[in-house]
Amino acid sequence: TIVGPQPKNPYEDLEFSPAAVKLMANQKTFKGHLLSVASLTLHPTKPILVTASDDKTWKMWHIPNGDLIMAGEGHKDWVAGVDFHPMGSSLASGGGDSTVKLWDFEKQKCSVTLSDHKQAVWSVKYHCLGEVLASSSLDHTVRLWDLPLAKCKMALRGHVDSVNEVSWMPYTVNLATASSDKTVSVWDTRSGLCVQTYYGHPNSCNAVVFNALGTSLASTDSDGLVKLWDTRMVSEIMTVSTGKHPANKCSFDRSGQVLAVASDDGKIKTFNTSNGDLIIELSGHEDAVQAVIFSQNGKSIISCGSDNTFRLWQ
């Protein structure tokens, strides 16, 4: 649970070379859904991807060939957020029907529906120990779910507009949130209190993500700005402009030295996190790119977008 001591971060003693994004190209394109693909999550240990779509489904795929393993049907509206349980044994999803659903892979069906949110759910993320799930909503709240009991243990209140994404600081009880109120906050999920707020975005914050060490936080906004924050000093490191179009979800590579940003202009933009320089833009999507993630080994990027596709870059 989030009450006891937290496990050691395995990345503390490891160093990785930066992902070779300059060498990456669009290797494969999969027309995976009938409508826009909003988000992605990778299995913690296996080459398995789940995509969430406006077509009310999530789908599970084997990577790199894109073979369909399973589809989840049950949400009554678009699906916005998906996350694998840290053991890889189940999946959480959240969507436009204001529910969070937990899915049992063995039974291939929804096992629990959590319906305390009053409006659409944008994002769901498991704590590293797997017994608590965080969800964020258009209703301005974040909810923490006690999964063994299948009930809400706490609501985090403080944002004054939609909470668009949640992200756990790796191997801690701290949770970051990105909101349309133009702020990024960090919460202590034991006390339920907001412990840090990062100000400076001029528009709605769309995404928030930590590097593997939890020392840096990246956030994106609808003006196309990306901000990097130092979580120990609680200060801004830098601001990078991706252009005029909104910046959507973003992802650090495992070295923390490369940040990939999904852009509404149809490109994936990769930046050097030490100086903010643009490394390369990856073009191929025919509409807005909604989400992007690095593979665990850092050798590939997977993206998805409003052109109903997900794409493999390596």
Image (cartoon, rainbow, N blue to C red):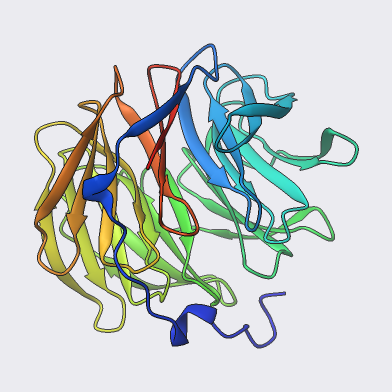
Q: As rendered, which of 168 and 272 lies closer to the eye?
A: 272
Q: Position of residue 196 (x, y in %)?
A: 34, 73
Residue 66 in sight: yes
Q: As rendered, which of 276 and 96 lies closer to the eye?
A: 276
Residue 16 against residue 32 in the figure, above or below: below
Q: Position of residue 287 (x, y in %)?
A: 29, 19
Q: Which quadrant of the view contains residue 55? A: top right
Question: With 236 as the anchor, is 74 left or right in this view?
Answer: right
Question: With 20 as the anchor, is 116 left or right in this view?
Answer: right
Residue visible at 32% across and 30% down?
289
Q: Which quadrant of the view contains residue 98? A: top right
Question: With 101 as the anchor, is 211 left or right in this view?
Answer: left
Question: With 132 as the anchor, is 248 left or right in this view?
Answer: left
Residue visible at 46% across and 30% down?
38
**Residue lying farthest to the right in this orientation:** 107
Quadrant where the image shows the C terminus: top left
Residue visible at 72% across and 26% down?
71
Q: As rendered, which of 159 and 214 lies closer to the eye?
A: 214
Residue 255 against residue 283 in the figure, above or below: below
Residue 183 in sight: no
Quadrant where the image shows the N terminus: bottom right
Residue visible at 43% across and 27% down?
28
Q: Position of residue 306 (x, y in %)?
A: 38, 20
